[in-house]
Amino acid sequence: MLFENNIDSKMALQQLKENWNYYLMLGIGLVALGSLAIIFSLTSTLISVIYLGISLIFLGFFEGAKALRINKLSTFFLHICLSVLFIVGGALIIFNPMGNALSLTFLLALFFIVAGILRIIFSFTQHIPHAGWLLFNGIITILLGALILYEWPYSALWVIGTFVGIDMLFTGWTWIMLALQAKNLPE
């Protein structure tokens, strides 16, 4: 059982059981979005790259707002520099998404490998009802990272969308399996 030793863990299990339908809906949504990302891999690659650029721009604006609220001159300049860096970096990514897909593909490979390792470690170190699915998810995620590195740089334009879709698909199934097991937890 998940966290079976204390009162907080019993509350966590109860919340898990009470909210199993939300986890199920999350899983179904991720399976649907993952399937669309695989089917439209070039489009999902471009969307992923542009999304990253937009996120960096927003982060830059928040850094700038934080800088304006800081009274110390030394940290003010640090936050202003970070703000400019995030905004310019995000804009450069948005204006050349195809070119940036190449370097982002390499970073995505590293991300998948690390995320897969962490999922596997978590599946062995925590007693959770869906540990087998989490282990399987981790193995698939590591394989995706290794495949990206093997095909890099030639498949950079389609691989991001395809592999993000596959990861979303398996993550969705992991949530679905958690939801189905949580539904049957004892009171």
Image (spheres, helix red, strand yellow):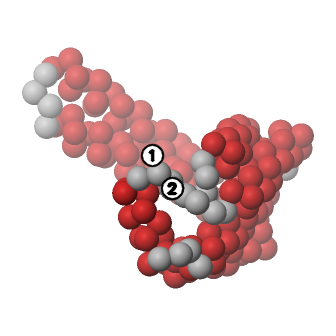
Report the residue that reaches farthest toward the left.
Answer: 71
Q: Which mark is residue 4?
A: 2
Pointer 1: residues within 10 angstroms few (<14), some, or many (20+)?
A: many
Q: Quadrant of residue 45?
A: bottom right
Q: Quadrant of residue 171?
A: bottom right
Query: Distance from label 2 to label 1 (Cα)?
Result: 40 Å
Residue at 22% x, 22% y is 75
Residue at 13% x, 22% y is 72
Relative to 72, residue 23 above or below: below
From the viewer's perspective, tell me whether residue 34 is left or right of residue 73.
Answer: right
Quadrant of the frame with the N terminus: bottom right
Residue at 53% x, 75% y is 186
Is label 2 or label 1 in front? 2
Instruction: Name the residue beneath numbered marker 1.
Output: 56
Q: Is residue 15 visible?
A: yes
Q: Which mark is residue 48?
A: none
Secondary structure, mark 2, is loop
From the viewer's perspective, tell me whether residue 77 is left or right of residue 183.
Answer: left
From the viewer's perspective, tell me whether residue 12 is left or right of residue 25.
Answer: left
How far across and down, in percent of the image, does residue 156 sit?
Answer: 79, 48
Task: State which tag comes first along the sequence, 2 or 1.
Answer: 2
Secondary structure, mark 1, is helix
From the viewer's perspective, tell me whether residue 85 is left or right of residue 34.
Answer: left
Amino acid at pointer 2: Glu
Amino acid at pointer 1: Leu
